[in-house]
Image (spheres, helix red, strand yellow):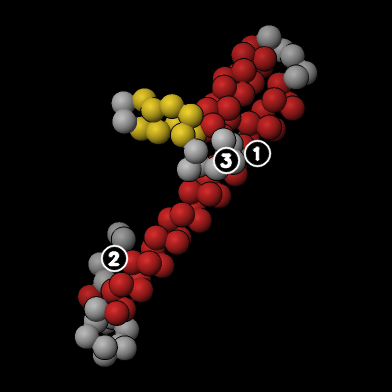
Amino acid sequence: MSNPLSVDVTFFTVLGYPISYIEFVGTVLYVLSVWLIARRSILTWPVGIVSVLLYMALFYQIACIRTRSSRSTTSVRASTDGGSGRSPNPRDIPSRM
């Protein structure tokens, strides 16, 4: 097994959605943390903190992947703009509101 903390390593698949080790362990620990809260255990805190740290690593990796793919898309768009080197007109960019 390569790196179990990587989102690229699939543990199992549910309905076509790949679940990574880090996502599975983070979810199990979070459910365990909720169960410990119900039992009023002091172990809620360390279990919850580890769960949050795993999710932080997961979301960081996903954001890096998304950033990498958006940079690739931007490069492709820049290379296909006819070589003009111009920025797009701000009026042509749809607003988010």
Residue with the mark numbered 1: 53
Secondary-structure class at tag 3: loop
Q: Residue 2's mark?
A: 3
Instruction: Give the quarter of the image for residue 36.
Output: top right
Residue at point 48%, 29% (across, down): 11
Asked if residue 79 lies left or right of residue 35, the reply is: left
Quarter of the view holding residue 6: top right
Q: For numbered disc 1, what is the local secondary structure?
A: helix
For label 1, the crowd category at 10 Å Cα-Cα, with few meaning under 14, some 14 to 19 and many 20 or more, is few
Examine the rendered structure and indicate whether residue 34 appears above or below residue 13. Answer: above
**Above/below status of 37 relative to 78:** above
**Three-letter amino acid code at the position of disc 2:** Ser
Q: Earlier in the sequence, mark 1 or mark 2?
A: 1
Counting residues from the N terminus, which is met first, the one under dot 2 or under dot 3?
Answer: 3
Where in the figure is residue 95, as x and y percent of width and height?
A: 29, 65
**Whole-percent x and y of residue 83?**
26, 88
Instruction: Say how many tags the image has.
Output: 3
Depicted 76 relative to depicted 25: above or below: below
Judged left or right of residue 26, residue 90 is left
Q: The residue under label 1 is which amino acid type?
A: Leu
Q: Which residue is mark 2?
A: 95
Residue 42 location, x and y as percent?
A: 77, 18
Residue 23, given in percent of the width and then of the height, sits at 52, 33
Query: Is residue 91 visible from the viewing direction of this image?
Result: no
Query: Dot 2 lies on which element?
Result: loop
**Which amino acid type corresponds to the residue marked 3 in the rendered image?**
Ser
